[in-house]
Amino acid sequence: MSAADPSWGPREDLDVLDRDIPRVDGAVKATGRAVYTHDVRVPGMLWARLLLCPFPRATVESIDVAPAEALPGVAYAAALKEPGDEVRYSGEDGVLAVVAAETPEQAEDALAAIIADVERAEPVVSPEQAKADGAPIVNRRPGATSNVDRRNESGDEAAVEAAFAGAAAIVERTYEIPVQHHVCLETHGHVVEPIDEDGEVLVHASTQAVSGLPRALAGAFERGGRIRVVTPHMGGGFGSKFGPGREGAVCAQVAEATGRPVHLMLTRADEFAMAGNRSGSKQTLKLGASDDGGLVALRLDAERYGGVGGGALPRPPYIYRVEGEASVMSRIASVHTATDSSRAMRAPGHPQASFAMESAVDELAYELGMDPVDIRVRNLESPVHHRQLERAAEEIGWYDHPHHIEPGTPDETGRAVGIGFGVSVWSPGGRGSTCDVTVHPDGSVVSATATQDLGTGARTYVAAIVAEELGLTVDQVTPRIGDSSLPPSVASGGSVTTGSSAPAIKDAAHRAREALEERVSTVLEAPVGGYVWKGGRVMVRDDPDRSLAWIEVCALLREPLVARGQFQASLYEGNVHGAQAAKVEVDAMTGRVRVVKMVAVQDQGLPLNRLALRSQINGGMIQALSFGLLEQRSFDEQYGYLVSDNLDVYRIAGAQEMPEFVTIIDDEDQRPAVGGMAEAPVIPGHSAIANAIYNACGVRLTRMPFTPANVLEALYGKV
Amino acid sequence: MSENEPPPPETPPISRRSFLRGAGQVAAAGGLLGSASGERPQAESDSSDGVETLSGAIEISLVVNGAPRKVEVEPRTTLLSALRVHLDPPLTGTKLVCDRGSCGACTVLLDGEPAYACLTLAVACRGKQITTVEGFGTPDAMSDVQEAFCSKDAMMCGFCTPGFVVATHAALERRPDADLEELRYELSGNLCRCGTYPHVFEAAQEVQRMRGKDGSGR
Amino acid sequence: MRPFDHRTPTSIDEAIAALPAERSRTGAQVIAGGQDLLTVMKDRIDEPEALVDIGGLGLARIDEAKSGDLVIGATTTIQAIADSEVIAKRFPALREAARSVASPQIRSQGTLGGNLNQRPRCPYYRHPDVTCFKKGGNVCLAEFGFSKYAAIFGGGPSYFSHPSDMATALVAAGASVDVSGPEGDDTIPLDAYYVLPDAALDTETVLAPNQVVRSVVVPAPTAGERSTYLKFKERASYDFALAAVAVTVNLDGDTIVSARVVLGGVAPTPWPSLEAAAALVGRPMSPETWKAAGEAAVADAVPLDHNGYKVHLVKGVLYRALESLA
């Protein structure tokens, strides 16, 4: 056997990849036939609902489920807290009871019938409440005596102050970023089928971690069993769906107690309360530059708001280089509130860091009378960023824009137009996924790996990579994913899925091809490695007239050929860069910010599927736009009610928020390796919008989101 | 809390105890359910006047995607629940996302007009033509809108997609020549989280082109 | 939702007979489109024992009376109003208001009567676990809590803002509602239809629980009048108004000789601003006048902690509305 390593090959030789590939599950999704966890219907299935405490902190006096049990159709009702138990924080710790009934309507009746008696305690939902003298300690760290935990402290204050002393310009502001939610349209949850006669527990799960979930759930099943997780389709995760959550454990409990399949998907209100959020932050960022725009000193004092969790914020300097060894210091603390823990969310911590850093860099440009593009180029090391910024500037119309060095002012009718920029970096990981490619004597091919498709198009490249390697069309390969009984794959977080799975799929396909070439060599008599697979045929490289059709190749097999592929580090790419630009219209009369155009220029190594890649980049820009213009979790601070527990109050961007998008795959990047594209495009969009607002009208927005309320307050002060 | 904020009212405004959906409603709900749990579901009609009264579990007939379907519901059963849960076999293409008419994932057509199935009572749909995403096409025979959603990648996770497909059919029915701004307006009742909007618009425009070309102008 | 009976009367009288004389959260209610009512029931604000469906009573219509008045039946859909050629031609502000309502799905199913009678959107009111003044409790949580969307006019003891677009435009148009009840028929001017929370907390209108809105009558516009409705939302897509204005002006040359201004989304009822109207009359149609009208409109505003921006916003939205009429 030839020992050629798998490689993606020259791009000009690709027939399937690096093109627009319609997703293979498009038809089932577009016709409503794709079955999500929400849609699973199993004979005898019960519908379960959770009862959540509306107060973040409370003591349970009693929970009486008897009235629920007495109702028709109710199969199960149980208190999940005992009298005297405390509710310590909103969300997962506030799950008081569960009911399960024959229909969703009966489960709702049962929920309403439970009489829960709790003694409400001081809520502690805001950082101010958490930091107040005498505040109850809601910090979950053992032994904690304060709700503030110092996290990262680095840098020498005297040295940094000395660096600031040498700066030609210094800017300092405090940036406030609210807590954001993932808002997966399919809420979290499971359908658990209790252990069957073969000892299997079948769990339908809306999860980002098909391979990892069986182990994470194992402790929830007292009767044991071999847990199999299936996720053929899932309606969004964005970092919130790695573990089974409290709802998974409770679903398992009900299934075991009743011996019946149980459908427990969170309601939208429960989803907002307990299924994850992106941590907020308050960052006071001081940044100094020399007169040529080089950054020379940085000080960051920051708080992260991750509820009972720690929150996320990368240590500075963020993306941009600051000259000098001792010119950067940071003091980052977590302020704990009695609210559910933040979870990973699409580039955890990065959109927060981006907002402060991009705003400060931008402000320095105007202070120094520099072009905002130039100051970025001056302080970014990668030439990739330089070319991307210039391309973005050109596409957004920066070079025809009237004001670069000075911000504009609203015209006589109160309207203003501005342009702003931001950049991103990300290091998509890659690690131990596996894949089996099976070629059957009848010519059918199956590519199987346990991975999940969150909407990224993973299922499509599971087939397409194999098709490329074997000279087939995508529809000749059947992808099988979303099943923990398949070859293991990584959890989908941090853009690792493509960098992990694609190399394993490629490796499996390559091994299958070599194994096929061994059979083919008995007929075509060229050595393994001496063939070209193209257009449904295998041809001898040096004599293309000697060839076999795919079906003839497969007929040489007496039994299915199975090739196991492993992750190959040589096939994945670890760094991606992006630049984004936004053009906005600001109505100074009403505070309306309308984004009219966004441009993204993004590299990523070899694009497996350009169509799905553009969707991913668009998706990042749109989530950043939505975060920038609209999104904010809101608690009532008097009693602790979550007031933004529905899609009316927690607004996400809709069709009429959409600007023109120019989505550019940076094809100057010709690295022969692949990486994921989940995080990078979500990082800079809201920063570019904030900078565009400043460019339009000279007002620096330091508090997200840029709603009319916040814009009007920035323009005219608080009333 | 700011310093000049008035002190809370003297009576604790929110009962410290028994927060829950509770108390007083239980008996009433139980009573109603008791009366509703009779074995033979039927629509009772009070003959003393012309008022039809439906109470408890009843079997109704709905015309779903052109075919009459028997389904047992209560007056409170939403069309969404009737489709997804109570029909046998159920039709789960129509999605439950917000359950408050905020997101459009449950969009269906009622006599050709778009509607949120979560804000529609099943009993009020008797005699109406109900069209769900499944009624527009199958994976092997998709509607032009469904085809365009695939070719333009107007879907990612796919959970909003059925609602968008139905809403796009309705939008193009209402405004066959809608420009981009009008398309955004006509599709503003549906939310997507993955960020497929630009490709949804491209798909709608592709359908406009194709319909214009073949003169079907539906 | 709690179980309920579904009643389908064949006449208005039957509908009235099926409704209770006394208001309560469990009493029977009228349903037509149900686009607001069902959300109220899902959030357990009201749990009516029966719904009386008036959708089949043939009330839907858009007619021009000989007098030039416009009659819109209560169960006419918002979409039908938005699509009406008569309304587009003669009542542009009504068309704008209808177009600005919610989403295509809501407009297609929701009715004019339902829109006028929709309940507050205050997130506390809508929260199933909150018992505020409006739900028989003893506090308005918005007053000292999350008040971003609350009223800056007319608040107290409750501070919700009225959500109806059609109501704001119709009050400005001088419309009235024809209602039927056990005592017979009545006509109620729309500006007397809505009540402030200091007059009633368990309802937002003077409509009795056993009265039914049959139709809305909009008087013919005066010759040469210009009117518009401008809704300003936090989200451009599908949202309620942060602030809205309905404005009607008559000009003599460039001088405003009469004006009506009604604000929406900023008070517990549609909020006629006599002050703004007075600031317009006798002045030229100019940016200075529009700004002066805005200042007059907000002179008596009483913002809470989080809604002071609405003071600026009212000025801006009124300016933009008047600008569009110039």
Image (spheres, coloured by chain):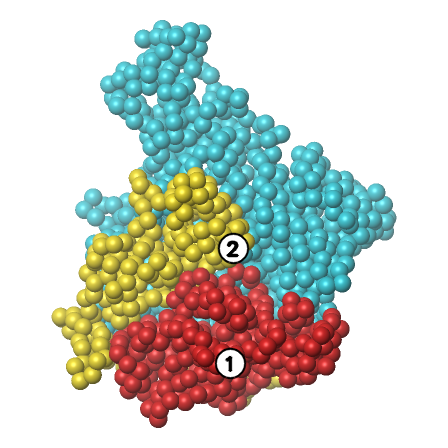
Chain colours: A cyan, B yellow, C red
User: Which residue ends up furthest to the bottom in the rendered image?
Assistant: C183
Question: Is C143 situated left or right of A703 in this image?
Answer: left
Residue A519 higher or lower than B16, as above or below: above
Q: On the image, numbered disc 1 is attached to which residue? A: C219
Question: Is C222 situated left or right of A235 in this image?
Answer: right
Q: On the image, numbered disc 2 is attached to which residue? A: B182
Q: Secondary structure at mark 2?
A: helix
Question: Numbered disc 1: what chain?
Answer: C
Looking at the image, which is closer to me, A645 or A66?
A645
The amino acid sitting under disc 1 is Pro
Label of residue A48 in the image = none
Q: Residue at x 41, y 89 (%)?
A: C186
Q: Is residue B53 shown to the viewer in this render?
A: yes
Question: Numbered disc 2: what chain?
Answer: B
> Badges 1 and 2: C-beta atoms under 8 Å apart?
no
Q: Residue at x 47, y 29 (%)?
A: A17
Q: Quadrant of residue B26?
A: bottom left
Question: Is B11 situated left or right of B120 in this image?
Answer: right
Mark 2 burial class by Cα count in 10 Å: few <14, some 14-19, many 20+: some
Question: Is A130 situated left or right of A341 in this image?
Answer: right
Q: Position of residue A604 (x, y in %)?
A: 57, 35
Question: Total number of numbered labels?
Answer: 2
Q: Is residue C316 shown to the viewer in this render?
A: no
Q: Position of residue C222 (x, y in %)?
A: 58, 79
Looking at the image, which is closer to me, A469 or C274?
C274
Alpha carbons under labels 1 and 2: distance apart: 31 Å
The amino acid sitting under disc 2 is Glu
Q: Residue at x 37, y 83 (%)?
A: C212
Q: Quadrant of residue A481?
A: top left
Q: Residue at x 58, y 84 (%)?
A: C154
